[in-house]
Amino acid sequence: MLKMTGLAKVYLTSDVKTQALQPFNLSIEQGEFVAVIGPSGSGKTTFLNIAGLLENHSEGVYELDGKDVSTLSDKHKSAYRNEKIGFVFQSFNLIPELNLYDNIDMPLRYRKFTAKERDERIMKALEQVGLAGRKNHYPTQLSGGQQQRVAIARAIAGSPSVIFADEPTGNLDSKMAQGIMSLLQDINASGTSIIMVTHDNEQAQQAQRIVQIKDGVLSEDAPILAQAIA
Amino acid sequence: MKDLAPIIKTLLKAKASPFLLILQIAITFMVMVNAVNMLSERSKNMARPIGVDETNSFYIQTNLQGESNALGARLDEDLVRLRALPSVQGVTPMSAIPLEAWGRATLINKEPAKVFEYGAYFAVDESVVEVLGLNLIAGENLSVEDVYTLPMDGIDLSTNILITKAVAQSLSPDDWQQAVGMTVYLSNDKPQQVKGVVETMQGPWPLWYGVEFNVISPLREAYNEVRYFVRAKPGLRDEAMEQVLEALLKTPGRMIEKAKTIETLKFEAYQSDRATSKLLIGVCLGLLIVTGLGIYGQARFSVNRRKRQIGTRRALGASKGQVMRFFMLENAVVSLTGLVIGFIAALSLSEQFSQHFGLTPVPLPYLLSGMAALFVLGQLSVSYPALQASRVEPAIATRSA
Amino acid sequence: MFSYYVKLALISFKRTPLLSFLMVLLIAMGIGATMTTFTVSYMMSQDPLPSKSDRVFSVQMDSRGDGYDWGESSLAEITYMDMQNVINSGIPKHHVVISAVSTMLKNPQQQTQAIKSKVRTTNADFFTMFETPFLFGSGWDEQADKQAQQVIVLTKKSNNRFFNGENSVGRFLQFGDVLYQVVGVLDDWQLMPKFYGVKTEAFSEPHDVFIPFNTQVKNELMVGNLVNNTCWKSYEGDDFAAFLASECMWVVLWVELDNDAAREQYQAYIDRYAQQQRDHGRFANRIYNRLVDVKQYLVDEEIVSDDSKMAVWLSVLFLIVCLLNCMGLMMAKFHGKAGEVGLRRAVGASKQHIVAQFSVELAVIGFIGGLVGLILAQFGLAIAENLYNYLHASLMQMNLILVLSTLLLAVLVSCTFGLLPIFKASLTQPSSQLKSL
């Protein structure tokens, strides 16, 4: 589903050249749950941004569903993010002046759904994260864990094939974090790929695969590790 | 001044917002100086003396009845009756009234049938200088012997006339006093002898270029329509007007077309100028307020956005004064740029206005004082946000967002 | 999608009330000022006769002697002689002769005090050519013109004054010291501008009553200051007949010519007439005959004052300053929304979506600004009515077209001045804002 060959990222400012990611190869199949670990500043978020089509890579080839993404226009990439990708962020990134319903509605608005279809999807997503009764509440009325659940509902409402999660539990206590992790597990179980950036080794162990980034160098631990835990 | 280089650098980087302010200041300046110029021109027009006693005078437009050869006698009856009123100082019949917007234009030629100058023609009687309160500055006053009474247009006779100083200067540019005794030809090409020169008496049309070019001729025109210019004894104007109207209305069939004080006449003559002046003042005030608020708003916004940066500067040892100076200086750079562009724009707008609307170009002192005023406005508007910036605590730098 | 964007715009309005309010206020002030001055200027320059302004012409002839070149402005009137000589050509559909006198009027049965009134003197065609509406009766007929009958038509206002609004047709009005019989009462009627008379009265109400021009002549009623009278040459004699025979130009003549052919024919006719007169020693200055249609006449006579045009330009500049200011606020507003833009971009909104969303937001603000501007413009017009109290009050009233164009203008300028801020906002990188919203 996702194939990166010789991919690298270089940031160029007027006088400094920063190699954020060294060239690497990586491929991820549909339905996988991949954890990306590494210390802060190692290039995890850059990797995620590139994988999630939020940023362009500078070298190599990135194929998504067999398509070279560098051939896609901005408009196509937007549509791709909208239909195939879901995002979950560390700081939830809900819009405070919209209620839960409208927050989840947001990505669906950029697709050609009827009002009825949108409503069905939103309600289904809310049910899935266990917040169906609070659709008219505003984000500030919820706890951090609940807010992250809303963000997850927003990510899954469009039935994406992959979810990118950037430190989804980073702002949560361990109890809430565990709830979010099992929610992600459930989503993964229904066939959606999950690629999760985290610096928490324990959480990483819950993934099927672990990719490590350190100082811009991406390396893959043996998948056996994950199997052993499973 | 060492801040100047970084300020210019940031301004160039930020581009849009300062550019908007620059444009705003430029337009405000351009419109303002031109508007003030127009205002002063209009108020100069309005302040010009009519040349007559404005406070104690009024005029009546009324009718004389009867066969045309009897109208002279009717005119005499009216004049005798009105002059006898206790509150009246003097009365003269006039063929037109200054600033009334109705009158007779005439050629004022040095030779017959050779167009020299245009002006307005007033037919009056010998008492005109005393009654109107004109200032005779050369030659002699009209006397009873000069006066003719005619039932119709008197412009056809050769008489002794008075002229205004403006006419005298035009006739004899080297020494206007030489105009006394000259012979001039009016529209009918009959010779007229200049007997005296009065300092000012404005013509009927306030906005006409020839408003100061007037010829006063001692001809009592006994039409079926006459105008009486009445000067009341000091302070008795309204009383005199009542008495005059009452006296006139004793004649059966009397029709009072108009009864107006000279003050009202002048007020009405310039009403459109006054309306435009008020509009111009309104536009200027609006512009100043909006621009002042704009500078204030932009400064606040940029202070808010740069709070951390300011805090860091403070933490690194910048004094409150230095922070404040930075923002004041930033505004000064923006304002001056706007004013320089505005200066050029104002000159070209002024050029356009003088071409299309016949206005005088904006004088340099206006431009300079306008620049100073807007510069001060800018500094004042920015001073409060700058003060707020100086109060940003250095500790903000170490706090996370 | 549009309604979604409108919803978002309203939410955004609530989120930054002060900023949004300031934007609305700025747009409203600029629009209010512009529409106030524009309304006055627009109403002044309206077509007074939309159905036939291109077919109604002022007949102008330069009948002056050699060397008299006092400019075109004194040519709107012609001499009585020339009017009499050309009026029977039969080419125009209508001839309208215009002059005016003033008199004292009263209802002899009811009033003791006569009221000074303005009298329009004209002919029967006036009422047909200008299609005047009648409340009672009608205009007089050509017979009345020919016989110079003492008939009179009243405006609705003077009918109220002299006859308490009753049907006064057939009754008598004392005109000076003779009686005139009422034949008709006009309904409300106002040409705007009232172009047919003198320029200074273009924005005032019609004269109080109308009588036949020939009756004025027969009764030797002198024109006063209600009429421009240019006498370039003095005349012999001092009676009314001498005045009529003089070279004084004081009669305004309007004709209605149905088509270009008629116009050409009539032009040729008056040119021929002028040439004949020249052969007899008149028209020595030049042969200069013009048929000036209503619109051109308004321009020639400078009916719309320079001041009112200048006021429009000044207020447009004021609007621009307001909008530049507003543009700064838009930048600030959108800058504050960078996080939201990043998020929306991340979840799949394209640049176009962002542009559309913000355009709608600005359109909504512009619309509200337009509404407030309309209210401000009403205040502005009330002030203008006060300021220009010497002009007809209907000049200071907006019609539906002006109201709609106010709103349209507000929305349009808001979006135009928003183009740059919107464009800048749409460039926000989706990834840059997601770490901390």
Image (cartoon, rainbow, N blue to C red):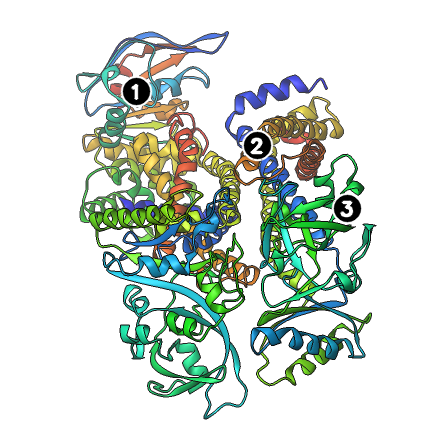
B377 sits left or right of A189 in the view = right
Please name the amino acid that badge 1 sits on: Ala
Residue annotated with mark 3: B181
Report how far apart the C-alphas of labels 1 and 3 lie in the structure: 104 Å
Question: Which tag is nearer the camera, tag 1 or tag 3?
Answer: 3
Question: Which tag is nearer the camera, tag 1 or tag 2?
Answer: 2
Report how far apart the C-alphas of labels 2 and 3 lie in the structure: 43 Å
Mark 1 on the same chain as mark 2: no
List x then y, in percent, for residue A195. 29, 24
Residue annotated with mark 1: A51
List x then y, in percent, for residue B360. 63, 37
Q: Which element is circle 3 on? A: loop
Residue annotated with mark 2: B351
Mark 2 on the same chain as mark 3: yes
Q: Nearer the viewer, residue C5 or C402?
A: C402
Q: Nearer the viewer, residue B184 or A65?
A: B184
Residue at 48 percent across and 56 percent down: it is C377
